[in-house]
Image (cartoon, rainbow, N blue to C red):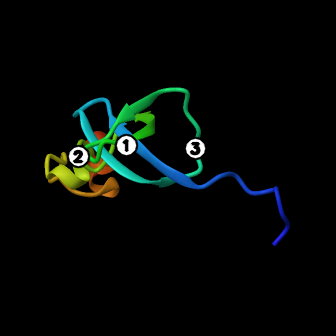
């Protein structure tokens, strides 16, 4: 590997702004904002709009289309039954 071409990999805290869910993980993202984590250390804070805590697929609040597939919807829309 070439030296000095890779971004610094470090621990950061991601904050889901829609659910206030926080998690600590490794990342190369940079941020001016910091937060004190549960272990007493300070880490960079990255704000995200959606995570597994708020995404409909993971929360089970997914809107299911029970009337049929695309072809069925097309036929219904244009009365092609």
- Quadrant where the C terminus sits is bottom left
Measured as percent of width and height from the top left, residue 18 is found at 27, 30
Measured as percent of width and height from the top left, residue 17 is found at 31, 29
Q: Could you tell me how far apart the alpha carbons at marks 2 and 1 are, in whole angstroms?
A: 24 Å
- SS state under label 1: loop
Local crowd at mark 1 within 10 Å, few (<14), some, or many (≥20)? Answer: few
Query: Is 30 placed left or right of 66 in the picture?
Result: right
> Which residue was labeled with disc 3?
29
Residue at 15 percent of width and 53 percent of height: 66
Q: Nearer the viewer, mark 3 or mark 2?
A: 3
| Most foreground residue, 14 or 3 | 3
Outermost residue on the right side: it is: 2
Local crowd at mark 2 within 10 Å, few (<14), some, or many (≥20)? Answer: some
Measured as percent of width and height from the top left, residue 28 is found at 59, 50
Looking at marks 2 and 1 on the same chain, the residue that comes earlier in the sequence is marked by 1
Looking at marks 3 and 1 on the same chain, the residue that comes earlier in the sequence is marked by 3
> Which residue was labeled with disc 1?
41
> Which residue was labeled with disc 2?
53
Measured as percent of width and height from the top left, residue 37 is found at 31, 41
Outermost residue on the top side: it is: 33
In the rendered image, which quarter is residue 71 located in?
bottom left
Outermost residue on the bottom side: it is: 1
Number of on-image labels: 3
- SS state under label 3: loop
- Quadrant where the N terminus sits is bottom right
Using the rendered image of the protein, determine whether residue 49 is visible from the camera's viewpoint.
no
Residue at 29 percent of width and 40 percent of height: 77
In the rendered image, which quarter is residue 54 located in?
top left
The reply to whether dot 3 and dot 1 touch (C-beta < 8 Å) is no
| Most foreground residue, 8 or 41 | 41
Using the rendered image of the protein, determine whether residue 35 is visible from the camera's viewpoint.
yes
């Amino acid at each position: 590997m070439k030296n000095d071409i890779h971004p610094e990999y470090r621990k950061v805290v991601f904050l889901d702004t829609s659910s206030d869910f926080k998690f600590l993980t490794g990342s190369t993202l940079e941020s001016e904002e910091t937060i004190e984590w549960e272990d007493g250390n300070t880490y960079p804070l990255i704000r995200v709009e959606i995570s597994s805590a708020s995404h409909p697929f993971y929360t089970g609040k997914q809107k299911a289309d029970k009337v049929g597939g695309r072809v069925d919807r097309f036929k219904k829309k244009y009365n092609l039954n």
